[in-house]
Image (cartoon, grey):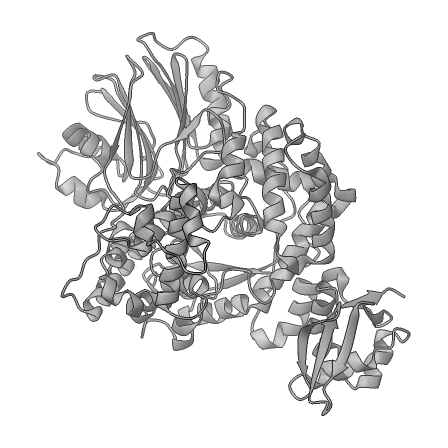
C-alpha cells in the first residue's frame, strides 16, 4: 500500500519552478499511506510523488521503477500476485533489477501497450509516464480495490491516490458535488438497482474506473479509455455439475487467499463470526503468524458475532483480540470530522468508525503489521443478500424482488410508464422498459450483479482502503478475485436456486474445512441484528453531545442554508436519541457528513499525519467466553448507563400491560396498539418483574418482589428503555 500523486503539464511546456513545491504538498497529504519513505521526481512535463509502505522487497523496491533506457517511469500502489508467472512469460526473459512485484509492469507495458494488464492478477493502481510517446497512463485493478483520481484544469492534469492530495493544487475546484451527494442511490437508499458510474462526490475530480486503462496525451490533453476486463453477465445453461462448480469455487478461493498472503511484513486478519472471514483464516494456514482482530460492541455481542469469532479463532489456533468499544465510547466532534476527511465520502458511518479503530488497535499492538486480510466482497456475488432481499422465502422471491428493483431503475428514465405497474394487476412485462443487461431475455439477477459491482467500487473498496491506509496498513480482499467472481457468474440459471441462495456454493465449498456451525451460520451483518440499537445509541449521542454541537456546525455551513431542513434534522436527532432502535441514524449522518465535507473541502484540514489521535481502544482478554459474559454486558452494552438499584422503574404513560384470561400470554400495548407479546412460561422472570412495577418502588425493591435477579432482566430492561416502553428515574 502506497501513495501515488503527481502533475502533468498539457501542451508541451515543461513543469515550472514551483512544481516541486506542489509535488511535496501532494506527498505530505499522502504520507499516511506510505510512512516508509517519499520520492519526488520531475521528468519533463510530468512530476511524480510517491510515498511507500514496504510490504514486499523493503530494501530494493523503491519507486519510480524505470525501463532500462529511462523512457518509461512507473509508480504503483498494490501487489501483483502473479508477477513471477508474468516475468517467466516475457519475451527474452529480461533481467529484473529489483525483487519488487511491480517491476514486471514496466516490461508488460512496453510489450503490450494498453493491453498490458490483461493477464495481471492483483490489487493495484498504476501511473506510467511514457516519455517517448508523451503519454500519461492511469490504471486500476478489476474491482477498484486500490484508488486513483485525477482532475483536469486548463493546461494541467493533477492526480493522486486520495482526493485530499489533489486538492493541494489550488487550480483544482474546491467544491463538493451536491447533485451527486443528494441524488446518488447509495445516499438516498432508494430501492432500485443502480448501474451508473461511481461518483467521487467532488466537483471536477474524476475516478479512474475499475478494470480500465486511461491514457492522457500530454501534447493535446486528449483522454482515451480502454476497459481490459468486464464483469461476466452472460451465464448460460451448460453440462457442468454442481460438484464441479463448488470445487472450482473452492480452488479459486484457496488460490486467492494464498496469493493475498504475499508479504515480507506481518499480516493480520479481521475476523467476524461469519463464514467469509473464517474461510480466509482457514486458507491462510501457511502463514506462520496471523493475529486476528474482532470488534466487540453492544451490537456484535448481542448478535453473537464477537463470540463466534472468538470460537472460530480457537478452531484456527490463531490469537484473537476482542477490541472492546464500551457503551461510553462516543466519538467526539473533531474526531468524527477527521475520520470523515480521511474517508472523503459522505457514506462514512458506524461501520467505518469501528474498522478504523480496529486498524488503529492492530497497529498499536503489532507495529510490524502492514497487511490486513478481510472477508469483504463475498456476499455481493455469491448470493449473500438473497435471504435478506427475498424475505427468507425462496430464490424466486429474491429474483422477484430484484426484478422489481431493476424495473424501478429503468422507469427512472421512462417515468410515464410507471402507471402501468401502479394497478392491482400490472399489464406490461418488465421487457417493456428495456432489457437492462442487453441479453435476449430479461434477467434481473444479472442486473443485480452489475449494481453490486458498482457498490463494491463506490462503497466497500473505498472505505476499506481508507480506514486501513489511515493507519499505514494495506487492506487485501481475497474474495475480490476475478477467478472467484467468474465462477459464480458462470452458474447456469437453472442452478442458481441451489448454489446461490443463501451462499450455498460457498457453504458447500467450506464443508469439512470449517466447523459445521460456522458453515451453517445465517448471515449476520457486522453489528446489525439483535443489538444494533446499542450501536445506534452511540452515534445518536455523538450528534447530541455538547448541546448538539456537531449537528449545529453542519447545519450552519453556507451550503446547508436553503437545502437542508434544519428543523427536521434537529427533530430527527432528538427522536433518535430517545429511540435509537428507530434505525435512521445512518441516514441522518449522511446529510451531516455532506455539510461537514462541504466546509472541509473549502478549507482543508491539516494532513492526516499531523492529526492528534484518541486513546487506542483496549482489548478484552477472553479465555472462556462464557465466564466473562457478565462483565462484557456491562462494559459493551451499558457502560455508565448501567441501571442502579436505586433507580425507580416506571412504565410510560402510553404503555399498558394486559394479560389474557388464562394469564398464559401477556401484551405490552403502546398507544392502544399491541406491540410486544410476553409468554408467561418462556419469559416468566421478565413478566414477574413487569407486574411488580408500581412507579414508586426502586429497582432493588421491584427485583425483590418479583424474585428476579438483575442479570436475568438487565438486557430486556435496557431494551425496554431503548424502545420507549419503560423509563428509569434516577434516585
Which residue is more in the foreground, 361 or 667? 667
Examine the rendering and report whether any part of residue 108 can be seen: yes
Q: Position of residue 397 (x, y in %)?
A: 39, 66
Q: State whether residue 217 is above or below residue 485.
A: above
Q: With 505 as the anchor, is 178 left or right in this view?
A: right
98 left or right of 53?
left
Quarter of the image with the N terminus is top left
Q: Where residue 509 appears, x then y in whole percent?
A: 29, 68
Residue that protrudes farthest toward the left in the picture: 92
Task: Report which quarter residue 413 is drawn in.
Answer: top left
Using the image as rendered, state which of residue 223 and residue 237 is in the foreground.
Answer: 237
Q: Which residue is painted at 27% across and 56% down in the image?
A: 484
As displayed, is residue 71 above or below residue 656? above
Q: Is residue 480 visible?
A: no
Residue 201 at x, y percent in the picture: 49, 33
The residue depicted at 30 percent of the width and 50 percent of the height is 431
Q: Position of residue 504 (x, y in %)?
A: 33, 69
Answer above or below: position of 193 versus 684. Answer: above
Amino acid at each position: 500500500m502506497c501513495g501515488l500523486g503527481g502533475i502533468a503539464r498539457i501542451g508541451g511546456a515543461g513543469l515550472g519552478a514551483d512544481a516541486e513545491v506542489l509535488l511535496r504538498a501532494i506527498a505530505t497529504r499522502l504520507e499516511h499511506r506510505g510512512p516508509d519513505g517519499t520520492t519526488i521526481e520531475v521528468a519533463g512535463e510530468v512530476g511524480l510523488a510517491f510515498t511507500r509502505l514496504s510490504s514486499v522487497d523493503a530494501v530494493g523496491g523503491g519507486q519510480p521503477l524505470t525501463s532500462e533506457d529511462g523512457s518509461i517511469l512507473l509508480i504503483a500502489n498494490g501487489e501483483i500476485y502473479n508477477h513471477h508467472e508474468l516475468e517467466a512469460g516475457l519475451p527474452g526473459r529480461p533481467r529484473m533489477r529489483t525483487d519488487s512485484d511491480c517491476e514486471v509492469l514496466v516490461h508488460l507495458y512496453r510489450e503490450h501497450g494498453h493491453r498490458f494488464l490483461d493477464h495481471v492478477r492483483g490489487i493495484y493502481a498504476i501511473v506510467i509516464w511514457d516519455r517517448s510517446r508523451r503519454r500519461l497512463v492511469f490504471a486500476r485493478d478489476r474491482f477498484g480495490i486500490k484508488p486513483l483520481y485525477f482532475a483536469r484544469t486548463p493546461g494541467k492534469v493533477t492526480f493522486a491516490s486520495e482526493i485530499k492530495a489533489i486538492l493541494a493544487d489550488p487550480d483544482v475546484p474546491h467544491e463538493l458535488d451536491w447533485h451527486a451527494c443528494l441524488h446518488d442511490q447509495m445516499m438516498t437508499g432508494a430501492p432500485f438497482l443502480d448501474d451508473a458510474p461511481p461518483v467521487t462526490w467532488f466537483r471536477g475530480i474524476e475516478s479512474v474506473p475499475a478494470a480500465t486503462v486511461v491514457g492522457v496525451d500530454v501534447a493535446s490533453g486528449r483522454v482515451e479509455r480502454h476497459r481490459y476486463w468486464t464483469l461476466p453477465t452472460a451465464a448460460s445453461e451448460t453440462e457442468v455439475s454442481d460438484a464441479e462448480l463448488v470445487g472450482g469455487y473452492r480452488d479459486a478461493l484457496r488460490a486467492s487467499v494464498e496469493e493475498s498472503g504475499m508479504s515480507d511484513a506481518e499480516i493480520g486478519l479481521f475476523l467476524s463470526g461469519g463464514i467469509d472471514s473464517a474461510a480466509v483464516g482457514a486458507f491462510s494456514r501457511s502463514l506462520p503468524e496471523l493475529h486476528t482482530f474482532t470488534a466487540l460492541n453492544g451490537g456484535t455481542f448481542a448478535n453473537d458475532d464477537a463470540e463466534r469469532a472468538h470460537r472460530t479463532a480457537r478452531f484456527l489456533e490463531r490469537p484473537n483480540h476482542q477490541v472492546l468499544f464500551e457503551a461510553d465510547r462516543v466519538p467526539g466532534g473533531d474526531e468524527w470530522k477527521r475520520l470523515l476527511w480521511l474517508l472523503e465520502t459522505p457514506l462514512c458511518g458506524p461501520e467505518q468508525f469501528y474498522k478504523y479503530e480496529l486498524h488503529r488497535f492492530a497497529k498499536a499492538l503489532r507495529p510490524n503489521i502492514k497487511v490486513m486480510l478481510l472477508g469483504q466482497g463475498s456476499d455481493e456475488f455469491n448470493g449473500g443478500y438473497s435471504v435478506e432481499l427475498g424475505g427468507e422465502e425462496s430464490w424466486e422471491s429474491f429474483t422477484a424482488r430484484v426484478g422489481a428493483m431493476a424495473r424501478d431503475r429503468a422507469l427512472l428514465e421512462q417515468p410515464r410508464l410507471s402507471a402501468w405497474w401502479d394497478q392491482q394487476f400490472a399489464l406490461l412485462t418488465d421487457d417493456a422498459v428495456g432489457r437492462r443487461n442487453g441479453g435476449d431475455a430479461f434477467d434481473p439477477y444479472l442486473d443485480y450483479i452489475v449494481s453490486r459491482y458498482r457498490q463494491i467500487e463506490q462503497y466497500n473498496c473505498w472505505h476499506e482502503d481508507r480506514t486501513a491506509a489511515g493507519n499505514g496498513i494495506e487492506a487485501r480482499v481475497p474474495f475480490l478475485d476475478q477467478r472467484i467472481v467468474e465462477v459464480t457468474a458462470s452458474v447456469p440459471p437453472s442452478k442458481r436456486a441451489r448454489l446461490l441462495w443463501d451462499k450455498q456454493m460457498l457453504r458447500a465449498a467450506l464443508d469439512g474445512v470449517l466447523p459445521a456451525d460456522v458453515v451453517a451460520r445465517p448471515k449476520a451483518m457486522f453489528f446489525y441484528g439483535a443489538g444494533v440499537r446499542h450501536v445506534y445509541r452511540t452515534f445518536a449521542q455523538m450528534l447530541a453531545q455538547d448541546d448538539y454541537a456537531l449537528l449545529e456546525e453542519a447545519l450552519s455551513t453556507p451550503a446547508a442554508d436553503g437545502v437542508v431542513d434544519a428543523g427536521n434534522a434537529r427533530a430527527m436527532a432528538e427522536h433518535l436519541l430517545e429511540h435509537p432502535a428507530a434505525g435512521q441514524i445512518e441516514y441522518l449522518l449522511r446529510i451531516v457528513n455532506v455539510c461537514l465535507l462541504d466546509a472541509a473541502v473549502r478549507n482543508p484540514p491539516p494532513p492526516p499525519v499531523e492529526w492528534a489521535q484518541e486513546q487506542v481502544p483496549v482489548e478484552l482478554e477472553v479465555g472462556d467466553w462464557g465466564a466473562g459474559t457478565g462483565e462484557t454486558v456491562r462494559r459493551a452494552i451499558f457502560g455508565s448507563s448501567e441501571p442502579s438499584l436505586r433507580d425507580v422503574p416506571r412504565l410510560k404513560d402510553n404503555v399498558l400491560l394486559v394479560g389474557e384470561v388464562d394469564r398464559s400470554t401477556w401484551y405490552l400495548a403502546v398507544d392502544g396498539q399491541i406491540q410486544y407479546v410476553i409468554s408467561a412460561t418462556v419469559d416468566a422472570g421478565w413478566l414477574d418483574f413487569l407486574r411488580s412495577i408500581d412507579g414508586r418502588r426502586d429497582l432493588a425493591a421491584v427485583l425483590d418482589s418479583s424474585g428476579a435477579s438483575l442479570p436475568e432482566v438487565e438486557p430486556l430492561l435496557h431494551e425496554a428503555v431503548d424502545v420507549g416502553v419503560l423509563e428509569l428515574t434516577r434516585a
